[in-house]
C-alpha cells in the first residue's frame, strides 16, 4: 500500500529549469509595464573631483527626455545613509548620498540621472550635460595611507583618518610561541580586486503610485525584505507602503545584496515623476558601480617546529575599502573573515592577526561569494605548503599532522571560531583516495622526466554558513537572519509553500519542495512554491552567506511537520483511529497497518468548504507558518588542483580539480555538486584571470567584458566532487550551507599546485591572478 | 551602452559605394560584417554619421583560383575561410589560423575585408597576409590597385586605403609544395585577441628549413615580418634550444617593437615572441 | 558626442524579415541592434543582453541558419533575412533532446546564459557533433556562464551527441 518514495537525498531535476531552457525566464527587464521610462546616469569620469557646477538644461531639451535630476534634486526625496554596526563602534563610516553632491569620490559614482522614453535617447542626452569638474588627487595605495603616510589628508575629513576600521586578534601568546619555533616562514600576499559579473546586470523598475504614496519595486535582488526596509527608511515612506517583487534573477553572487545609489535614485525619480522608471545597468557601468571584492595586501607568517608541528600564524592585512563602507552590511566583513579564519583548520594555538581597512577613491568593496574566506584560505594553505616544503614533509602529511582533532583540540579556533567538530581529517583521507594522490604524484614525476611540469595542490577550508542574529540584528541593522515559511493545503490537496528565501538558480526552491513533499507524503509535483514578494512572503533574510536552503529549508521542514501534525489530528478524529496509527504517504493520511485513509484532496476540500464536517476540538486552519532563527553552522572541506605549467610562456592550465565537502546531510546531491562546481570556477577565475586593474589615477583600466577576463569553458577543468557526512545536531534539517565552499578553496588549491610546479625552478608566486607575466617574473624570465 | 544615432544606407553596387564615400565624407563608415565596427560603436568610441552597408554586394563574396592565385573577396566570412576546401588545400596557414579568430558566432559574420581594413595589430589575418605575401586589392571609381601586405599595414588601425577606396579582395599566390606552415599564438583565453602570435612558413626539401617567413602579431603597431630572426633562424635550426632561443631573441630585438600595455610589458611580449619563434622552428623542422 | 546628432535622431528605416517563421515589418532607428529589435519590437524576451559589446554570447541567435551575436547585428542589416531565436527553435522541437539534457543534468542555474548557450550548442550539434569534451569546451568558449562552472553544460551536450549518435545507429529519425 505504501508506494510513496521520498526524494530528499536524491538528484531531482529543478522544475524551474524547464522555463529557462525554453527562453521563458522572466527577468526584471522582461517585464512590460505601461508608461515605463528609462533611467541613465552620468557618472564621474574622475576618481576624485569637486563638482563646481552641473548644467542639465541642454539634456532636458532632447526630444524624448522627460526629466533630469542632479544630486540635490534627488536628495530632496531620498536621505543619505551611513553603514554602521552597533557591534563595531570603532568602524569609521561616512554618509553616502544617492547621487554625488559637490564631490565625486570614485570613477563611476553617479552624479546625475536622466529619465527618457528609451535608454538610447537618455544616453544621447548624457553627452549634453555640462559639468564643471575640478579634479582632485585620488588617495594613494592603501598601504601608503595605512602605514607609510598615516597623516595623508583623509577622504572623509570628519573621520580624521583614512583607516576605516582596525582590529587585532591575539590568541595563544604568539610572542612566546613564535620564539620557540624552529622556523618562521614569511610571505607577502597580494589579492587583487575582483568583481562579481553576474550575467544579468543590476536591474530595477520602480513604480510609485502618488495617490496612495505606495512604491512597488521590481528588482533583481537577493534580499527583498532588506530592500523594502531600506527604501521605506530612506525615501520617507511607511514600510507598509513599499513592496519589493523579485522576478527571475540572472546571477547575483553577493553583487545584488547591497543598497546601490543608482537603484534608490531610480525609486526617487519615480516618486518625483509619478511614473514607472526602469534602470538596467549596462556592462560598462557595472564594472565601475557594482561592488568589488577582495583587494588585500597581506604580510603573513607561519611558525613551525622541525617535526612539522605548526605553532601559529601571524597576519597583517591591509584591505581595500573603496570610497564608502557599503550599506547596510558595511565593507569590513571581508577583512574580518580574512583575519579570523586564518589558520582555522589547524590546531596551532597562536594567532596574531591585524586588519586595517582603508578608504580609497575606488568603487566600494562589499560582500561577494566567499567574503574574505578565500583570503584566509589562500594565506593559510600557501604557508602550510611552504612550511612543508622547507621541512621536506609531504603536503598531505603536513596537514594530517596539524588538522584540528574533534574532541581533543579546544572547541574554538585561535581566531575564535567555534569549529570544534569539523571533519578535516576524514575529508583529507577521502580526497587522497578520490584523486589517487599517490598515483598522481607518480604521474607528476614521470611527466617531469618527459619535460612536462605538472603541479598538485591541496587546500583545506572552513565555511561560515547561515549566521545567526548576532551578525546583523545585534548590530542594529534591519536584516533578518531568520526565515519563515507558510504552507497552505489547497482544496485540491496540493500544498503551496510561501517562503522568505530567494533562489537565483541555486536550487534551494527545489530543495524546499523535496523536503515538504517528503514530510507530507506528497509527490514532488504536488508542491507549489511562491517566493520573492514582500507583500506575500514571510519576512526573511533571502539569500546570502550560504543560508538559502539551510534556513529556508529548515523553516519549510518545520512548517511541513506542523501541517502534518494538524492533518493527522483531523484525520484521527474523522477516521476514529489513534494519531500514532497514522502516517502521511502517497497524497493521503493513512493507517499504518490498516485500510483507512483520507486523501489530502479530501482533507483540503473539507478544510476549505466543509468545515462543518471537521472536529471542532482540533485546529482546522489549512495554513501554517513556521519561523526559524539559525545560530550559525560551520562547514568544512578540502580541494585539490592539478595543473600544468608551461615554464617558457608562463601559461598555466588547470587540468583537473577535486572537492570533498562536508555539509552534513545533502538534500539534492546534483544541485549541491553544481553549487560546488560553479563556486570552484569562480575561485579559479580569481586565481587565473580576474582583476580590476586601476592606474595611478585610480581609473579602472579594464572596464569591459573583453578586458576583464572571466573564466570561459575552454579554460576550465572537469571537477570531481564527493562528500563526507558529519551529523549536524540541533536542527530538523541536519544540513549546513554549501554555496560558497567552492569559491573559498579553489584559488588556494590552484596556487598551491602552481607553486608545486614552480618549486622545481626555485621560485614561488603569492599574488593572484597568476597571469602569464607574473609567472614569468617569478621564473625570472622577464623583469 | 547603445549605439549613438547614425544614418544607414544599404548599398546596391560598388559604384553607389564610391559615390556615397565621396558624398558623405570622412564621417561615413563602411559596414561589412560589423563585428569590429559595431563593437567600437557599442562603446561609443566612435560616432560616424552614416554607415554604408556593403553586406549585400554578393560580387565581393567568393573564394576562387584564378591563374594560379587564390582570390578571396572582401566579404568572404571567416567561417567560409575556415571550412573552404580550397583554402585548406592551397593556403593551409589560413586554415590553421582561423580557429584562433574569436568564436563561431563572430566568425559567421566577420569578413576578411573588414578584418584587414581595421588593421588591428593583434588580429590573425593581417599576419597571415604578411607571411603569405598577399596582394591587397583596393578599388575606387578610378580603378583597382594592388598593394603588397607589408606596405598595406601602416600603423595602429592604419592602412594604405585612400579616400574613395574600398578593399575588394586579396590575391594570394600559394607557395610551392616544399613550404610548410605553422600558426600559433598566446592568448589569455581561447578566442581572445592574442598577446603575441606568429604566422610562420618554412621551405626546405629536407627536415631543416632553408628559408623562413615569420610574421608576428601583437608585437607592435602593425603585423611585422621579422626578417632578422628569419635570417638567424634559417642558420640555427639545428642548434640546441637554449642557444637558438637566445639567437632568436637577439634578432627579434631588432625586428620588433612591442608596446607595453596592462596585459603584458614589452619585455614579456618580446620573450613570448622568441618562444613562439623557437617553437615554430621546432614544429617546422622534420 | 556629436551635439547635433543627439537632438536629431536618424530617419527610421523600414525592414522586413522572417522571425521564427513569421514575416515581420517594422520601422526602426538604424542604430537598433537585433536584440533590442527582438525584445522591444517583438516582445521576444528569450534573447538576452549580457554585455552588449560582443563578448558574452547571451545574445546568440541564428541569422540565415548560422549563429551570430545579436548585439553585433543591426536590425536594418537583416532585410529579407531569416532569424531564429530560442523561442523559435524551442517551438520547432529541433533541440528538445538538448533542452531535456540541460534540465536533467542541471546545466543551468540562473538561466540567463541558457538561451544563448543552447543556440551555440545547437550549432555544435549540427555542424561538428563530437562527444569530445575539449571540442565541446572550445566551441562554447564564447558563451559566458557565471553559475555552473561549465562542467554540467559539457555533460549535457556530450550526452545529447551520444544519444543522437546511438539513435542514428538504431535507424532513428536523426
Image (tube, coloured by chain):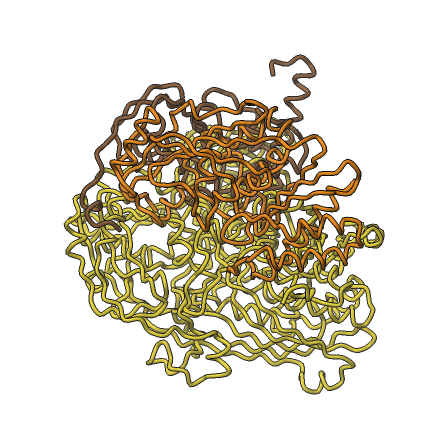
- Residue A738: where, in percent of width, then height? 59, 52
Q: Classify residue C78 by image quadrant.
A: top left
- Judging depth in this view, the residue of A68 and A180 nearest the camera is A68
- Judging depth in this view, the residue of C155 and A207 nearest the camera is C155
What color was chain A assigned in the picture?
yellow
Residue sitting at x 32%, y 38%? A31
Q: Along the horizontal axis of the image, is A614 left or right of A686?
A: left
Asked if A699 appears above or below C156 in the picture, the reply is below
Asked if A698 appears above or below A517 in the picture, the reply is below
- Residue B76: where, in percent of width, then height? 48, 29
Asked if A65 appears above or below A779 in the picture, the reply is above
Residue sitting at x 25%, y 58%? A112
Residue A429 visible from this viewpoint? yes
Residue sitting at x 43%, y 47%? B158
- Residue B3: where, in percent of width, then height? 32, 43
Q: Along the horizontal axis of the image, is A389 left or right of B148?
A: right
As drawn, the chain in orange is B
As drawn, the chain in brown is C
Residue A637 visible from this viewpoint? no
- Residue B64: where, in percent of width, then height? 54, 23
Q: Which image quarter is the C terminus of chain A in?
A: bottom right
Q: Classify residue A45 by image quadrant.
A: bottom left
- Judging depth in this view, the residue of B174 and A780 nearest the camera is B174
Amino acid at each position: 500500500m505504501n508506494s510513496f518514495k521520498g526524494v530528499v537525498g536524491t538528484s531531482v531535476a529543478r522544475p524551474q529549469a524547464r522555463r529557462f531552457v525554453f527562453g521563458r525566464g522572466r527577468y526584471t527587464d522582461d517585464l512590460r509595464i505601461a508608461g515605463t521610462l528609462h533611467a541613465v546616469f552620468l557618472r564621474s569620469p574622475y576618481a576624485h573631483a569637486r563638482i563646481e557646477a552641473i548644467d542639465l538644461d541642454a539634456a532636458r531639451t532632447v526630444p524624448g527626455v522627460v526629466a533630469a535630476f542632479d544630486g540635490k534634486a534627488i536628495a530632496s526625496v531620498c536621505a543619505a545613509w551611513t553603514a554602521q554596526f552597533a557591534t563595531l563602534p570603532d568602524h569609521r563610516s561616512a554618509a553616502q548620498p544617492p547621487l554625488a553632491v559637490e564631490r565625486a569620490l570614485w570613477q563611476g559614482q553617479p552624479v546625475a540621472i536622466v529619465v527618457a522614453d528609451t535608454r538610447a535617447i537618455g544616453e544621447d542626452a548624457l553627452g549634453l550635460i555640462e559639468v564643471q569638474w575640478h579634479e582632485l588627487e585620488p588617495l594613494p595605495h592603501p598601504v601608503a595611507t595605512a602605514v607609510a603616510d598615516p597623516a595623508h589628508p583623509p577622504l572623509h575629513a570628519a573621520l580624521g583618518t583614512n583607516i576605516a576600521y582596525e582590529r587585532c586578534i591575539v590568541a595563544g601568546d604568539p610572542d612566546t610561541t613564535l620564539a620557540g619555533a624552529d622556523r618562521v616562514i614569511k610571505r607577502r600576499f597580494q589579492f587583487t580586486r575582483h568583481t562579481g559579473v553576474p550575467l544579468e546586470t543590476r536591474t530595477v523598475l520602480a513604480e510609485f503610485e502618488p495617490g496612495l504614496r505606495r512604491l512597488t519595486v521590481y528588482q533583481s535582488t537577493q534580499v527583498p525584505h532588506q530592500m523594502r526596509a531600506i527604501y521605506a527608511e530612506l525615501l520617507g515612506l511607511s514600510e507598509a507602503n513599499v513592496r519589493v517583487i523579485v522576478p527571475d534573477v540572472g546571477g547575483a553572487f553577493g553583487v545584488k545584496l547591497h543598497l546601490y545609489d543608482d537603484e534608490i535614485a531610480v525609486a526617487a525619480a519615480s516618486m518625483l515623476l509619478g511614473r514607472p522608471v526602469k534602470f538596467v545597468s549596462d556592462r560598462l557601468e557595472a564594472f565601475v558601480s557594482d561592488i568589488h571584492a577582495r583587494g588585500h595586501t597581506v604580510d603573513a607568517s607561519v611558525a613551525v617546529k622541525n617535526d612539522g608541528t605548526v605553532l601559529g600564524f601571524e597576519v597583517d592585512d591591509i584591505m581595500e575599502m573603496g570610497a564608502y563602507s557599503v550599506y547596510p552590511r558595511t565593507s569590513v566583513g571581508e577583512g574580518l573573515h580574512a583575519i579570523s579564519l586564518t589558520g582555522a583548520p589547524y590546531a596551532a594555538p597562536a594567532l596574531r592577526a591585524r586588519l586595517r581597512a582603508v578608504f580609497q577613491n575606488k568603487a566600494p568593496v562589499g560582500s561577494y561569494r566567499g567574503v574574505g574566506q578565500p583570503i584566509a584560505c589562500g594565506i593559510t594553505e600557501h604557508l602550510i605548503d611552504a612550511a612543508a616544503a622547507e621541512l621536506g614533509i609531504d603536503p598531505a602529511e603536513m596537514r594530517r599532522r596539524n588538522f584540528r582533532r574533534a574532541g581533543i583540540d579546544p572547541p574554538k579556533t585561535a581566531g575564535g571560531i567555534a569549529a570544534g567538530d569539523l571533519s578535516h581529517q576524514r575529508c583529507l583521507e577521502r580526497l587522497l583516495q578520490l584523486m589517487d594522490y599517490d598515483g598522481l604524484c607518480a604521474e607528476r614525476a614521470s611527466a617531469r622526466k618527459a619535460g612536462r611540469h605538472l603541479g598538485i595542490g591541496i587546500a583545506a577550508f572552513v565555511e561560515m554558513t547561515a549566521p545567526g542574529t548576532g551578525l546583523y540584528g545585534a548590530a542594529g541593522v534591519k536584516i533578518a537572519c531568520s526565515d519563515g515559511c507558510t504552507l497552505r493545503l489547497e482544496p485540491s490537496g496540493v500544498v503551496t509553500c510561501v517562503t522568505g528565501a530567494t533562489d537565483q538558480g541555486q536550487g534551494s526552491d527545489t530543495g524546499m519542495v523535496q523536503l515538504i513533499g517528503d514530510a507530507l507524503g506528497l509527490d514532488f509535483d504536488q508542491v507549489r512554491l511562491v517566493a520573492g514578494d514582500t507583500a506575500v512572503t514571510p519576512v526573511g533574510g533571502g539569500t546570502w552567506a550560504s543560508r538559502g536552503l539551510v534556513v529556508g529549508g529548515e523553516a519549510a521542514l518545520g512548517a511541513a511537520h506542523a501541517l502534518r501534525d494538524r492533518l493527522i489530528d483531523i484525520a484521527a478524529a474523522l477516521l476514529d483511529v489513534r494519531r500514532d496509527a497514522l502516517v502521511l504517504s502517497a497524497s493521503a493520511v493513512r493507517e499504518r497497518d490498516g485500510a483507512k485513509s483520507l486523501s489530502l484532496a479530501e482533507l483540503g476540500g473539507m478544510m476549505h468548504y466543509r468545515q462543518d464536517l471537521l472536529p471542532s476540538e482540533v485546529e482546522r486552519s489549512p495554513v501554517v507558518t513556521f519561523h526559524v532563527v539559525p545560530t550559525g553552522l560551520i562547514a568544512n572541506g578540502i580541494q585539490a588542483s592539478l595543473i600544468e605549467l608551461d615554464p617558457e610562456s608562463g601559461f598555466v592550465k588547470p587540468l583537473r580539480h577535486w572537492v570533498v565537502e562536508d555539509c552534513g546531510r545533502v538534500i539534492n546531491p546534483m544541485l549541491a555538486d553544481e553549487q560546488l562546481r560553479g563556486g570552484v570556477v569562480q575561485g579559479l577565475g580569481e586565481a587565473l584571470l580576474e582583476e580590476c586593474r586601476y592606474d595611478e589615477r585610480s581609473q579602472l583600466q579594464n572596464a569591459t567584458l573583453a578586458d576583464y577576463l572571466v573564466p570561459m569553458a575552454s579554460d576550465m577543468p572537469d571537477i570531481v566532487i564527493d562528500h563526507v557526512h558529519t551529523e549536524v545536531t540541533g536542527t530538523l534539517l541536519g544540513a549546513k550551507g554549501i554555496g560558497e565552499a567552492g569559491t573559498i578553496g579553489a584559488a588556494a588549491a590552484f596556487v598551491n599546485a602552481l607553486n608545486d610546479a614552480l618549486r622545481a625552478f626555485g621560485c614561488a608566486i603569492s599574488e593572484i591572478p597568476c597571469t602569464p607575466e607574473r609567472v614569468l617574473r617569478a621564473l625570472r624570465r622577464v623583469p | 551602452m547603445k549605439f549613438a544615432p547614425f544614418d544607414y544606407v544599404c548599398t546596391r553596387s560598388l559604384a553607389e559605394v564610391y559615390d556615397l564615400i565621396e558624398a558623405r565624407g570622412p564621417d561615413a563608415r563602411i559596414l561589412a560584417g560589423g563585428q569590429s565596427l559595431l563593437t567600437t560603436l557599442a562603446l561609443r568610441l566612435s560616432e560616424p554619421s552614416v554607415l554604408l552597408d556593403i553586406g549585400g554586394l554578393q560580387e565581393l563574396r567568393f573564394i576562387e583560383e584564378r591563374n594560379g592565385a587564390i582570390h578571396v573577396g572582401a566579404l568572404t566570412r571567416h567561417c567560409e575561410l575556415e571550412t573552404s576546401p580550397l583554402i585548406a588545400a592551397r593556403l593551409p596557414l589560413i586554415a590553421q589560423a582561423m580557429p584562433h579568430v574569436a568564436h563561431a558566432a563572430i566568425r559567421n559574420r566577420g569578413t576578411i575585408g573588414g578584418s584587414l581594413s581595421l588593421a588591428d595589430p593583434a588580429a590573425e589575418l593581417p599576419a597571415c597576409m604578411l607571411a603569405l605575401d598577399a596582394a591587397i586589392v583596393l578599388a575606387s571609381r578610378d580603378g583597382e590597385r594592388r598593394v603588397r601586405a607589408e606596405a598595406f599595414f601602416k600603423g595602429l588601425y592604419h592602412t594604405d586605403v585612400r579616400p574613395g577606396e574600398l578593399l575588394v579582395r586579396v590575391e594570394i599566390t600559394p607557395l610551392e609544395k616544399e613550404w610548410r606552415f605553422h600558426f600559433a599564438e598566446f592568448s589569455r583565453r581561447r578566442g581572445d585577441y592574442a598577446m603575441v602570435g606568429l604566422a610562420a612558413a618554412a621551405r626546405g626539401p629536407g627536415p631543416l628549413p632553408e628559408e623562413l617567413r615569420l610574421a608576428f602579431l601583437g608585437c607592435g603597431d602593425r603585423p611585422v615580418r621579422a626578417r632578422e630572426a628569419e635570417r638567424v633562424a634559417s642558420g640555427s635550426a639545428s642548434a640546441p634550444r637554449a642557444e637558438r632561443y637566445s639567437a632568436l631573441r637577439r634578432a627579434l630585438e631588432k625586428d620588433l617593437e612591442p608596446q607595453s600595455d596592462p596585459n603584458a610589458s614589452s619585455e614579456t611580449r618580446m620573450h613570448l615572441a622568441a618562444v613562439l619563434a623557437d617553437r615554430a622552428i621546432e614544429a617546422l623542422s622534420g | 558626442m556629436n551635439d547635433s546628432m543627439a537632438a536629431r535622431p536618424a530617419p527610421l528605416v523600414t525592414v522586413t524579415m522572417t522571425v521564427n517563421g513569421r514575416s515581420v515589418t517594422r520601422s526602426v532607428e538604424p542604430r537598433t541592434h537585433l536584440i533590442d529589435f527582438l525584445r522591444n519590437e517583438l516582445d521576444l524576451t528569450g534573447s538576452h543582453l549580457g554585455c552588449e559589446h560582443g563578448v558574452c554570447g547571451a545574445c546568440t541567435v541564428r541569422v540565415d541558419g548560422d549563429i551570430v551575436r545579436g548585439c553585433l547585428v543591426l536590425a536594418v542589416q537583416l532585410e529579407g533575412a531569416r532569424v531564429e531565436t530560442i523561442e523559435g527553435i524551442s517551438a520547432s522541437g529541433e533541440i528538445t533532446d538538448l533542452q531535456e539534457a540541460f534540465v536533467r543534468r542541471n546545466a543551468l542555474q540562473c538561466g540567463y546564459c541558457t538561451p544563448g548557450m543552447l543556440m551555440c550548442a545547437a550549432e555544435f550539434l549540427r555542424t561538428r557533433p563530437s562527444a569530445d569534451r575539449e571540442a565541446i569546451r572550445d566551441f562554447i568558449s564564447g558563451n559566458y556562464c557565471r553559475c555552473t562552472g561549465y562542467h554540467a553544460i559539457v555533460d549535457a551536450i556530450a550526452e545529447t551527441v551520444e544519444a543522437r549518435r546511438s539513435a542514428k545507429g538504431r535507424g532513428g529519425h536523426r
